[in-house]
């Protein structure tokens, strides 16, 4: 679904022309809310059932701490809808509290995996054994694929972190036919010497199973896996993401794993086993539950999810 509200462009010099009443009203929002909306627009905040105006209020409610006065942009005064830029990534990291920090975001799966089953089914070494290179991921009952969800949240997350000054790299952006394999996903974070890595997913569990959970690396020392040095900082990262995810999205921790903590430790994920830098996975909700699916398919909610994850990362990186 295309965005039909007023066009807002990415940060640029303030214009002097008279503004429309709506623009003035939006400009009166706190800078953080404005930033949240502009970031949302910059990453193409649509493609779902949410419309622009709903998103404004949702973003406004969910971004109280994203304010950075230096990064607060001026809204365009153009009342006509305009195309959103497809590549909002600035060429230079902005100044901000995360300047010098490197974050790798790993959008789970790949929309092309469905057409490359032979390639993704080949086994790769994850230290504790071998596992498929990659998987297709799940989908909602209405057919919204997890691989699309993970890309959308990851792009929103990148925009939020870059606005805070971080250098952000995605492991894939639907810019390759399939994958990468889970061992390569880990290697990308390692070779970037990332300060934090988050792998974004949504679960495919039974209906009635609801809520999010963050997956932490277990202590594994076997083959190519040696997670000892990252277990502690990864738990810290995961706890901060879980806490901020609850606060910003209002979603409850999983009611089916983690005993209500929203935290699960696993030793069977290559992406964690092979990481040498702090890393967690987040399962943002259960795509097979209709109530969770209603959230996961909402652009406004995905923006909140990205904000929750972002604020957890910011908290971790600032210590
Ligand atoms: Zn997944």
Image: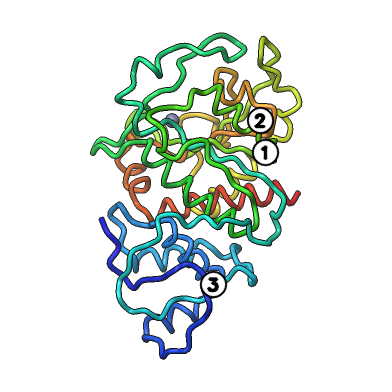
In the image, 9: left or right of 241? left
Q: How crowded is mark 2: few (under 14 residues within 10 Å), some or many (20 or more)?
A: some
- Quick one: SS at disc 3? loop
Q: Tell me where residue 135 sits by quadrant.
A: top left
Q: How crowded is mark 3: few (under 14 residues within 10 Å), some or many (20 or more)?
A: many
Q: Is residue 189 above or below residue 86?
A: above
- Quick one: SS at disc 1? loop
Residue at image position (33%, 47%) is 297
Q: Mark 1 points at which residue?
A: 194
- Quick one: SS at disc 2? helix
- Kindly give the residue lying farthest to the front in the view shown: 91
Q: In this view, does 61 lie above or below 142?
A: below
Percent x, y for residue 200?
49, 38
Kindly report the distance in space between the C-alpha atoms of the residues bearing marks 2 and 1: 6 Å
Q: Name the residue under label 2.
A: 190
In the image, 112: left or right of 310? left
Percent x, y for residue 10?
47, 67
- Which badge, 1 or 3, is on the more N-terminal residue? 3
Q: Name the residue under label 3.
A: 73
């Amino acid at each position: 679904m295309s965005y039909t509200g007023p066009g807002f462009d990415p940060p640029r010099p303030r214009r002097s022309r008279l503004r429309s009443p709506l623009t003035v009203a939006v400009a009166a929002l706190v800078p953080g809310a404005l930033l949240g909306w502009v970031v949302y627009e910059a990453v193409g905040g649509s493609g779902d059932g949410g419309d622009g105006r709903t998103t404004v209020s949702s973003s406004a409610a969910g971004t109280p701490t994203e304010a950075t006065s230096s990064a607060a942009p001026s809204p365009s005064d153009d009342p006509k809808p305009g195309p959103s830029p497809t590549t909002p990534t600035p060429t230079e990291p902005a100044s901000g509290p995360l300047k010098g920090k490197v974050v790798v975001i790993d959008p789970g799966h790949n929309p092309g995996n469905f057409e490359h089953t032979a390639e993704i089914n080949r086994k790769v070494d994850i230290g504790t054994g071998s596992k498929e290179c990659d998987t297709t991921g799940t989908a909602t009952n209405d057919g919204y694929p997890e691989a699309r969800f993970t890309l959308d949240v990851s792009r929103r997350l990148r925009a939020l972190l870059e606005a805070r000054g971080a250098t952000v790299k995605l492991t894939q952006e639907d810019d390759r036919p399939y994958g990468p394999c889970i061992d390569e996903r880990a290697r990308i974070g390692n070779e970037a010497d990332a300060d934090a890595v988050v792998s974004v997913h949504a679960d495919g569990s039974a209906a009635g199973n609801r809520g999010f959970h963050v997956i932490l690396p277990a202590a594994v020392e076997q083959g190519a896996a040696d997670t000892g040095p990252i277990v502690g900082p990864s738990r810290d990262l995961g706890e901060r993401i879980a806490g901020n995810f609850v606060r910003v999205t209002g979603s409850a921790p999983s009611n089916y794993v983690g005993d209500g903590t929203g935290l699960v430790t696993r030793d069977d994920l290559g992406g964690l086993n092979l990481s040498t830098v702090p890393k967690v996975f987040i399962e943002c909700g259960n795509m097979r539950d209709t109530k969770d699916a209603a959230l996961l398919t909402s652009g406004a909610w995905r923006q909140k999810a990205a904000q929750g994850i972002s604020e957890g990362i910011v908290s971790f990186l600032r210590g």
